[in-house]
Amino acid sequence: MKQFGLSMLMAISFFSATAAAENELTAEQIRDGWISLFDGETLFGWLPTSDVDWQVAEGEIRATEGSMGLLATTTQFADYEFHLEFKASAKAKGGLFLRTPRYGLDLAADNVWHAYDVRIEGEQILVRLDGRLVPSDDDSKLLKRGHIGLQFNQGPIAFRNIRLKPLGMKPIFNGRDLEGWNTDLAEKSRFEVTVDGELRVLDGKGQIESEGRYGDFVLQLECFVAGDSLNSGIFFRCIPGDMMMGYESQIHNGMKDDDPTQPADCGTGGIFRRQNARRIVARDHEWFSKTLIADGPHIAVWVNGFQVSDWTDERKPHENPRKGLRLEPGTLAIQGHDPTTDLRFRNFQVADLPEE
């Protein structure tokens, strides 16, 4: 593990109260493609590797005792910008692992909050601690993709404001025409490019399908639902040339009894018929963002930077994702659901995840 020291500062009470605004992305960060890896209230999207007493309190992930180990993201990431704030008591030992378990950064142990900002692309790594560039060498042994891990050795330690922005995203909708997409199965749906460079989807049932095929990837897009509780979805790893035969990331902002934790129909960002969104984050008649990561059998979705689903397909392999696990690359498809469909999309971007 690379060692980065800081001068000791006056000790203060270690577990101080944090403001409610911590762990929330700004509107600008959401538009720029950032996602939050910690919601400030739960460990959704994380798994421990040992019996450390990982807990959430006052908007912080904390640990005080247990066997040395990691709290790791359930999702793997490849190239990204990353931000994390941490605090460690004077006798604490811990670290931050990127693309675990190959590359680690130590935590300064002096009872005050510090921040790591990292940019990792291929074998290139740039690290800043509290805004200051710190020595870091390119690492040819670095995994091409991997989990992010918070390491506990001895405590107490705490973390907050953990966020990530995928890099290497490439547009797959040019905002001028439908180049790169086909409407062979449009049927009753209409797919138009607006004067503002948006893809408008009207009526249905039907689909528009990408010419490109994607297996393990990161997808980011923005969506506008021009009606109340309209239904649509993004299909992926589809059987090419077949009608909506893929996994579906749902688009539906309806909720039961005005309770955002009770989706009316799976919920935007849910994996349709597999896992409901844990919260309705998007709103109809407002632009919202969606980030989808398909990583082998694991699928995770963020809406407006908030993780709403985290699902692993444990079914037996099958060509059709409706019937079993499909890892083979397939097309993307946008659904025109029914005659009420009226949605707009923009900023469609994809990055293939490198082979492990």
Image: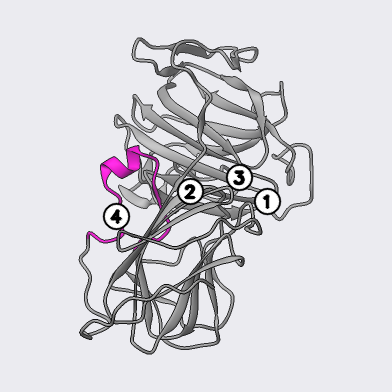
Q: Nearer the viewer, residue 231 or 11?
A: 11
Identify the magenta region.
21-40
* Residue at 31% across, 69% down: 114
Task: Quickly name the residue at label 3.
Answer: 294
| Tag of residue 297 | 1
Q: Main secondary structure of the magenta part?
A: loop
Label 4, label 2: how far apart the Cα atoms are: 19 Å
Instruction: Report the disc number at residue 329.
Output: none
Q: CA distance from mark 1 to mark 3?
A: 7 Å
- Report crowding for label 1: few under 14, some 14 to 19, many 20 or more residues within 10 A (C-alpha): some
Pick the front one: 337 or 335: 335
- Whichever of callouts 4 and 2 sits on the residue coming sooner in the sequence is 4
Q: Earlier in the sequence, mark 2 or mark 3?
A: 2
Please rate how many residues cluster around mark 4, counting C-alpha atoms within 10 Å: few if below 14, some from 14 to 19, many from 20.
some
On-image quarter of the N terminus: bottom right
Q: Is residue 179 above or below residue 256?
A: above
Mark pair 2, 3: CA separation: 16 Å
